[in-house]
């Protein structure tokens, strides 16, 4: 008696096998066709495997517009890094040069009787250079902001590409699972299940296209991975450059602040010296006004002073010639001179508007030395090695002579130190060394206040002492 088929879940097989003992029904599930199914699965998975095995490597990159753009961006970023490093080096050079100039100016103002007009011009030029440094520094700030924006953009782009890669990987995995599931249903059964011939053609088209689609998807996944890797590399380069640029910018800011502070200090020191110089000059003018109340007498005094100075110069020339013949004075001076005293320069060498100076050349009034003002009694030092040619009162001044020391450094080079206190730290004919104390600042002679008149005579003429410093 045949079994009741109404209670079975599976349909009967197309053919029931015959057995010697009569018909026996077996499991109604269709028997597998292992060889055929494996072939079908292999055919479906083969494109995927080929795509993965044939995936591009670092030496054989996948061609794609996006990947090309990312690599171009990376190369551009590397070039920008080199340009930025060059810009930082240029700014460093500007900062160092500016720092040296400011330091030199401050040393001049602090320890040397600076030509205030020259220092004022230097400070003006340094202000312009600081403006140039500010422009360069602002360029670093702008570049840093650009790098920050670029880094944010690259990171967001990498996040998007990472999400795209995740989705494509998931889709490819689903495709592989679908290909595996086809192993459970034969291609023939799937085709015969179609209701119409059009359905059957659609099924056939799907099985023919699915391999090529999976291959393209696998290629896209590999290309996305390489693009993401290039993006991540660009992000790392940009992040590193941003950190370096931030540190360099902070350092340049500190250096710039220091230079600006130094320049402000130099300006303040210059203003203080100019104020002090004006004060001392005002005192000299006041004293001169009292001494030279009568214009006629002033003219006579100037003429007498000029004649007396020439007379003294001739006397000193004779003394130097005698000492030179004895071998006490060298024929030439090797080296440079140094300032005899620190203080404020109230009068420089050259044409002046001060009426108490005698005329010379085209100048109605000419100052033939440099006047230096410091606290009364300040030590005065020899400007260079030499022999004391003369020390004592300058009687050529008339009834009110000044105490003066004259040092011969060579046959044709002398330094004069006038208006000193009448003290005797050295004596005539004594060899002195540069920096040795030869006297003390005073107010002797026709002086308008305690100061040192320092002059240099070269080849018989008074010349600018600054040329020998």
Image: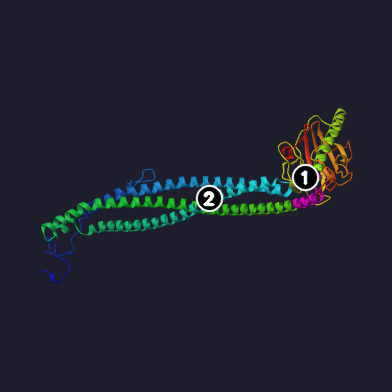
Q: At which x and y percent is residue 190?
A: 17, 58
Residue 135 badge:
2
User: What residue sits right under mark 1 in the picture?
Assistant: 356
Query: Which SS class for mark 1?
Result: loop
Residue 197 badge:
none
* Image point (29%, 53%), residue name: 217
- Quick check: is 288 in the magenta stretch? yes
Query: Which SS class for mark 2?
Result: helix
- Quick check: is 100 in the magenta stretch? no
- Which residues are the magenta region? 280-296
259 horizontally vs 312: left or right: left
Q: Nearer the viewer, residue 168 or 154?
A: 154
User: Is label 1 in contact with label 2 (beta carbons under 8 Å)?
Assistant: no
Q: At which x and y percent is residue 374?
A: 79, 50
Seen as rendered, the residue at the extreme top is: 325
314 horizontally vs 169: left or right: right
Q: Quadrant of the C terminus?
A: top right
468 horizontally vs 40: left or right: right
Q: From where the camera sits, is residue 104 visible?
A: no
Q: Nearer the viewer, residue 30 or 121?
A: 121
377 horizontally vs 150: left or right: right
* Image point (46%, 52%), residue name: 238
Q: At which x and y percent is residue 278?
A: 72, 52
* Image point (67%, 54%), residue name: 268
Rendering colour mode: rainbow
Camera-near label (1 vs 2) is 1
Name above or below for residue 174 compared with residue 360: below
Q: Dot 2: few (<14), some (14–19), or many (≥20) neighbours within 10 Å?
A: few
Q: At which x and y percent is residue 86?
A: 52, 45
């Amino acid at each position: 008696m045949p079994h009741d088929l109404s209670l079975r879940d599976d349909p009967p097989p197309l053919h029931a096998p015959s057995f010697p003992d009569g018909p026996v029904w077996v499991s109604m599930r269709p028997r597998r066709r292992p060889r055929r199914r494996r072939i079908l699965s292999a055919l479906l998975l083969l494109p995927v495997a080929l795509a993965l095995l044939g995936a591009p490597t670092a030496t054989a990159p996948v061609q794609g517009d996006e990947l090309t753009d990312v690599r171009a961006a990376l190369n551009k970023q590397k070039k920008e890094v080199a340009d930025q490093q060059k810009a930082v080096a240029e700014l460093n050079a500007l900062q160092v040069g500016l720092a040296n100039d400011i330091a030199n100016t401050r040393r001049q103002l602090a320890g040397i009787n600076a030509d205030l007009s020259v220092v004022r011009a230097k400070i003006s030029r340094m202000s312009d250079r600081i403006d140039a440094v500010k422009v360069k520094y602002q360029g670093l700030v702008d570049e840093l902001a650009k790098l920050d924006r670029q880094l944010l953009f690259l990171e967001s782009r990498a996040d998007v590409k990472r999400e795209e890669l995740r989705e494509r990987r998931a889709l490819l995995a689903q495709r592989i699972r679908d290909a595996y599931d086809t192993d459970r249903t034969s291609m023939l059964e799937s085709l015969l299940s179609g209701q119409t011939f059009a359905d059957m053609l659609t099924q056939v088209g799907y099985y023919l296209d699915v391999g090529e689609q999976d291959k393209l998807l696998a290629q896209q996944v590999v290309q996305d991975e390489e693009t993401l890797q290039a993006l991540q590399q660009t992000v790392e380069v940009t992040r590193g450059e941003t950190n370096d640029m931030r540190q360099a910018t902070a350092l340049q800011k500190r250096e710039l602040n220091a230079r600006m502070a130094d320049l402000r200090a130099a300006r303040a020191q210059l203003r203080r010296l100019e104020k002090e110089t004006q004060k001392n000059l005002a005192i000299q003018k006041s004293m001169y006004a009292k001494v030279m109340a009568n214009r006629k007498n002033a003219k006579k005094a100037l003429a007498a002073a000029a004649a007396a100075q020439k007379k003294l110069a001739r006397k000193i020339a004779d003394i130097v010639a005698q000492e030179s013949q004895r071998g006490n004075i060298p024929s030439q001076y090797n080296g440079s001179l140094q300032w005899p005293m620190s203080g404020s320069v109230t009068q420089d060498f050259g044409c002046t508007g001060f009426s108490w100076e005698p005329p010379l050349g085209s100048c109605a009034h000419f100052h033939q030395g440099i006047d230096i003002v410091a606290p009364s009694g300040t030590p005065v030092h020899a400007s260079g090695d030499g022999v004391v040619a003369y020390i004592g009162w300058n009687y050529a001044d008339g009834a009110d002579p000044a105490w003066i020391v004259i040092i011969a450094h060579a046959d044709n080079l002398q330094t004069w130190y006038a208006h000193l206190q009448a003290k005797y730290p050295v004596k005539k004919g004594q060899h002195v060394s540069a920096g040795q104390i030869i006297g003390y600042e005073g107010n002797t002679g026709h002086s308008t206040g305690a100061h040192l008149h320092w002059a240099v005579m070269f080849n018989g003429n008074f010349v600018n002492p600054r040329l020998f410093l």
